[in-house]
Amino acid sequence: MKNLKNALLLKQLYQLKQLGYKYTSVTAYKEDEPDLTLPNTLESLKKQSLECHLCTLSKSRQKVAFGEGNQHAKLMFVGDTPSASDDSAGKVFTGRSGELLTKMIENVLKLSRNDVYITNILKCRALDSQTPSPAHAHTCHPYLLKEIELIKPTIIVALGELAYHYLTGDDSPIEKVRGTLHTQSSYTVIPTFHPNHLLRNPSAKKEVFEDLLKIKELI
Ligand code: SF4
């Protein structure tokens, strides 16, 4: 809830900045205002994200990479940011890390990508020299919260530390928490390594395989 309030505050500050304000007091923020009215269908939510300019990543992206997959999926995967190939394709988890994620879903979980829903914390890619900041992630967070609200998954696999942090509010390193269950209000978060980490460290595949078997048991 605190994350959502922070996102609402940041959104209002960004909007004021876009209107030309240079200095804004947070006391001008009215928490009760129905400010963050996001659409109640995935199609409309995606459409809104495609036109989103709420944070500076809108300047660095080529295309918005909104989530995709089964709109009634019980299993959701959440990564961190779009890759360079996602950015040019306007799709999530393309390229080598996407291929690896697809293999994990098909070969271990015995599902297809069409059975699950896949998204990221951030919908836009930063320039190579620009690291997405907590402000970017907070500003984009309401899109993810709405995707979760609309899809209603029972299990969310957090791919990497950033996804785990934003889904649970816990700052623990991924090495320490991978494979553990974190019950949230209406779903359970299971963190594991991001496919990019596996591409750099193939020896970590064994741990991810164990995590996927645990997920398979749960579904
Ligand atoms: S990263 Fe999210 S908040 Fe920022 S411009 Fe893209 S869709 Fe909007």
Image (cartoon, rainbow, N blue to C red):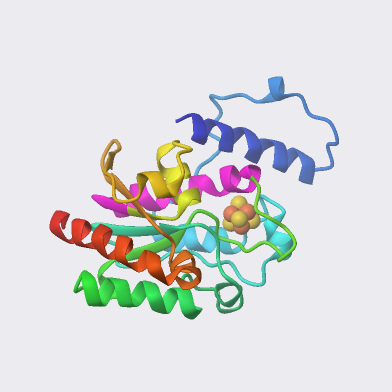
Taking 151 as reference, is 99 left or right?
Answer: right
Question: Where's residue 198, x and y in %?
Answer: 43, 68
Question: Where's residue 150, x and y in %?
Answer: 34, 51
Q: Residue at x 29, y 67 (%)?
A: 70
Question: Where's residue 88, x and y in %?
Answer: 61, 78
Q: Residue at x 41, y 44 (%)?
A: 167
Asked whether residue 38 is in view, the answer is no
Q: Residue at x 41, y 49 (%)?
A: 175
**Picture quadrant of ligand 1:** bottom right
Whether 118 is drawn above or below 157: the answer is: below
Give the magenta range: 134-156
Q: Is residue 84 magenta?
A: no
Whether 1 is drawn above or below 123: the answer is: above
Count up the numbered dots. Answer: 0
Asked whether residue 163 is in view, the answer is yes
Q: Is residue 145 magenta?
A: yes
In terms of depth relative to the viewer, which is nearer, 180 or 127? 180
Q: Which secondary structure dominates the residues rendered in magenta?
A: helix
> Residue 90 appears in which quarter of the rendering?
bottom right
The residue most toward the top is 27
